[in-house]
Amino acid sequence: MSDGSAASARCAVFVGPYTSGKTTLLESILYQTGKIHRKGSIPAGNTVGDPSPEARQRQMSVEPNFADCEFLGERWSIIDCPGSVELSRDAETCLMAADLAVVVAAPEVERALTLGPMFKFLEDYDIPHVVFINKMDKAAARVKDLLEALQSVSNKPLVLRQIPIRDGEAVTGFVVLVSERAWKYQPHKQSDLIEMPETVLDREDEARQEMLESLADFDDALLEQLLEDKVPGTEDIYQQLSENLAQDNIVPVLFGSAEQGHGITRLLKVLRHEGPSVDVTADRLGIPADDQLAATVVKTLHAAHTGKLSVCRVWRGKVQDGQTIGNERVSGLFHLMGGENKKAGEALAGDVVALGRMDEIGTGDVLTSNGREETSEALWPEVKQPVYAMAVSPLNRQDEVKLTGSIARLIEEDQALSLEHSPDTHQMLLWGQGEIHLKIAVERLKSKYNVDVEVAQPVTAYKETIRKGTTQHSRFKRQTGGHGQFGDVQIEIRPLPRGQGFEFVDKVVGGSVPRQYIGAVENGTREYCERGPLGFPVVDVSVTLFDGQHHAVDSSDQAFRIAGKLAMSEGMPNCNPVLLEPIYEVTISVPSDFTNKIHSLVSGRRGQILGFEIRPGWKGWDDLKCTLPQNELRDLIIELRSLTIGVGSFTQRFDHLQEITGRLADQVVQARRQEIEDSR
């Protein structure tokens, strides 16, 4: 429990699925604490959160919203994170700054499953968290049913802290189970204390007993009191709640309506009185107590007027504007409030602030008196493997350098993005966690960096090989008046086992091809293999040079290189060329209820199921292993999420190349030939 010191600001991070109402909750908290004097709304586009054009256009959070306020004399930093599963990296890094998290849930039993991955993350990193069931004014389900559904996806016991007071179907207030006091909701302000209605007495007594029994699982003294039918004191119960929340033993559950301002003060009181302090959080994260300065960078931003900003949580000591940390100087210190940056002279332990123009530090770095340190893997969440790609190219060819530089800044801001230059297809691939994720990135390239890009589907890296061998005698001869060109080679072409690549063997005897030209022949054969008879790179082929002829005057490296390439172009069509497609080993992770649907998904994409097993460490989840063609992976994540209410995921790795024949192969080859023709 916090000591209430004004010098130790605390940090709450709001997480939860898209449309659960996190940004509206932030707006209500800022309004009820007096930080803002007029409540904005998402449809009107005037909330403190979601200030970017990408967020306003979509009416959804696309990046973290930072704000601060005071409640009962205590300073709070609040970070409202995007709810889209495609933007979950921001939530993961910002949670590394949290004293505790507020998991905002919709009051729908069928959507409880969407919170499973977030609960798992919070549990893995021992982050204390509470659940706020939002939109209770529109809820059709009973709180008891909601609690059971949420408990099914949480490994930590959920402890209900309130029960609703209903007038018909409408929730008009609540009873606090610890104090046993009843309150009636008042729109957009604190609730009124009322006498407890007789209609809730039995339910209140039952729910309070369940709460105490949950706490007794962690305290023998409390268990003895309950067994002896003794009523524990109110202060003792609050102490138990605070200690168990800080140790991430329990998950308190509250409810309300952010839009109506219901339950906001009760939530703030729970956060203030029961949430851990910055010192407790620093100890949990292993921040050394003797550090004069310790801060963790949880988000990097590139702003138009201030340049690079490194948003960090200060754990120990203080940071001042102009201070030198390691080899870098803090050039500006800011408190963030939605889209506004407010200058500050210093930041104390507990504060969340942005440090200006510290170019050498990045998200995940720990700042100490000695400079910059990278976080260990144990303290910093691993970046998920990307699952969706777009090929990007500048609309204006003169912007190629500008494009790569701008994407580098986007990747600094968002670690879930990555850039790949495909050696097989020569495309620049922007990778991310889904289609929306990449569309937002492309929009930012335009709005922030004035770079227009063209986007296209990634090209599948088809290859080709041969099924049988042949021998080929080819000669390149050209006479132009002076020195001519002459190269004569005899080669054997034969297939290699899959995965062997390309092999060149020199078996020339007697000097029919002089030693100085052997390398040129090899270069010619390799050059041809960049595009075989079907139009794709050739693999798993052995070429043996066993004879040839040369001319004392007209032979040259160039002549023998051309002769080698000519021999391949004349011989390869006779080797029964066949198309190869890349096959990936894929592990699809889904809740067990959806496993049967995934069988149909895989078979419908020409996949082969290898088996499935329980996902390690995930209650009620399966891992289905299969192989899938690369071409079928393009939009796999879109269909997978559609089938699994957004929670399904997969990882992939290249496994092997596999022959592809028939109509599909003919279509691929024909499309490639048309592409080559169009490029001429």
Image: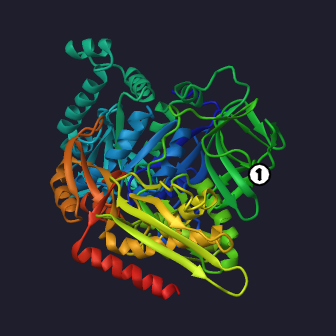
Front-most of residues 12 and 658: 658
Name the one closer to the observer, 227 or 246. Answer: 246
Q: Is residue 55 visible?
A: no
239 vs 660: above or below = above
232 lies above or below 600: above
**Residue 275 picture location, percent across and down:** 48, 33
Which residue is at the front of the view, 83 or 412? 412
- Picture coordinates of residue 221 (x, y %)? 31, 11
Q: Is residue 388 above or below residue 266?
A: below
Answer with left or right where residue 647 lies relative to residue 510: left
Amino acid under label 1? Answer: Arg
Give residue 210's quadrant in the image: top left
Which of 272/364 is in front? 364
429 with respect to 403 (left or right): left
- Disc 1 secondary structure class: loop
Name the residue tied to disc 1: 357
Would residue 674 appear left or right of 230 to someone viewing this image? right
Q: Can residue 246 be seen in this view?
A: yes
Question: Label 1 crowding class (10 Å Cα cut-off): few <14, some 14-19, many 20+?
Answer: some
Residue 35 picture location, percent across and down:
61, 53
